[in-house]
Image (cartoon, grey):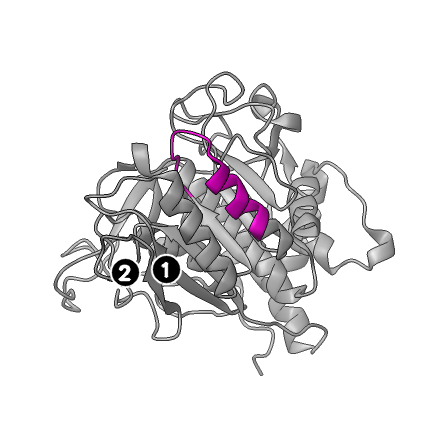
Amino acid sequence: MTRSLKIGRTPTGSTAGIDPSYSKQWAWDKMEVVQAWQLIEELRCKQSISEEPVAVAIVDWGIQRDHEAFGPELVAPGASVIPTGNGNIGDDDGHGTMLAGTIAGVVTNIPGGGRAVSSVRLLAVKFIDVRNPPMSDNAARAIRYAVDAGAKIINASWDVGLNSPELQDALKHAEDNNVFVVVAAGNGGGNNADYPAFPASLRFTNMITVMASDEEDQKPGFSNYGDNVDIAAPGVNIISTSPYICRPQASLSPFGIRPYRRYSGTSPAAAHVSGAAALLLSIKPNWTPQKIRACLMEASDRITALQPFCPEGRRLNLLRATERALLPANSLSGGVQTPEVVGTRLRRLGSPSLIVSACAA
């Protein structure tokens, strides 16, 4: 969440490139991201599925479009909807750029370009800057812009502090146009039923609200929670892209000028869900937001420690969601993951560190 962003130290332990750092992210192991990539890669190479690009709007502080991790086609020009702004979509804070790295990382394993199992296009819609904190009217304007610009998913990792007709109307506009909205639950550490956050405490059929979980599948102290929270996702010590003024030299990248940082909050948790939704929508382009939401929730892992904070203790599992999406429509069913199911998957798909393209000769 923008209001309580936590940025820690830069990653250490590797200067041999960026992909090794990303592939070791604990969150990817927890969500079985690499195994999901492998499954999609195998089917894509067999021409069993076709992928379509998905536009994801990051309604936030903007994005550093020329970051070394982002290819020229990854971030669309976007717009600033701040009435007193100059139209610049540059990231004044770092928050939007970190969200962009997390979302794109789940879908394409950036930076480094090692794999691109799905297409994603990030749309920067800036409504916050150093002079304009998150406000309902600007947020509503940004959501409407994203919908009208063709976004299929909107990431909303912020809290405007109060409800408003303008914000509700904008979210209804997204609902009416089949746009999936992913919302961070908030970083106040409280129950959203007692201390509402907005838009997290609003309920629309095209919206999913996300709390954070840590490496031990526990609720971190900062994360909001409650019955109106739909799912948890990793949100502690997440490595992602960070803005810089001067492009890092090869000898110093990625850690010499710090274009990558760790961040924590319900913001990266929501970004993980946005990335997962983009991956699903790329292979199921006709899915409605309601179907994406149901798939993510029903295919989640059920975590006992999270049950007091999130209905059924749901925590995002990208592999299970991908498997569910690829099932015939008449065979979809829920179910709780067991250790035996995990073992079967890993034996079938192999160790993530050994995954290669299924198209390789």
Classify 46 as above or below 195.
below
User: Residue 109 lies in what quarter of the image?
Assistant: bottom left
On-image quarter of the N terminus? top left
In front of the other: 79 or 1? 79
Identify the mark nearer the N-term, 2 or 1: 2
Q: Which residue is mark 2?
A: 89
For the residues labelled 2 and 1, say whether their Cβ atoms are less than 8 Å apart.
yes
x 19%, y 62%: residue: 253
x 25%, y 43%: residue: 132
Which element is circle 2 on?
loop
Q: Which region shows up in magenta?
A: 157-173
Which element is circle 1 on?
strand
In front of the other: 299 or 57? 57
On-image quarter of the C terminus? bottom right
Q: Is residue 158 left or right of residue 312?
A: left
Residue 87 image offset from top left, x and y in percent: 25, 62
Residue type of the residue flagged with mark 2: Ile
Q: Which residue is mark 1?
A: 124
Residue type of the residue flagged with mark 1: Ala
- The furthest residue to the top: 194
x 49%, y 52%: residue: 154
User: Residue 241 lies in what quarter of the image?
Assistant: bottom left
Few, some or many residues within 10 Å of mark 1 (<14, 14–19, 20+) = many
x 40%, y 69%: residue: 74
Q: Is residue 298 left or right of residue 358?
A: right
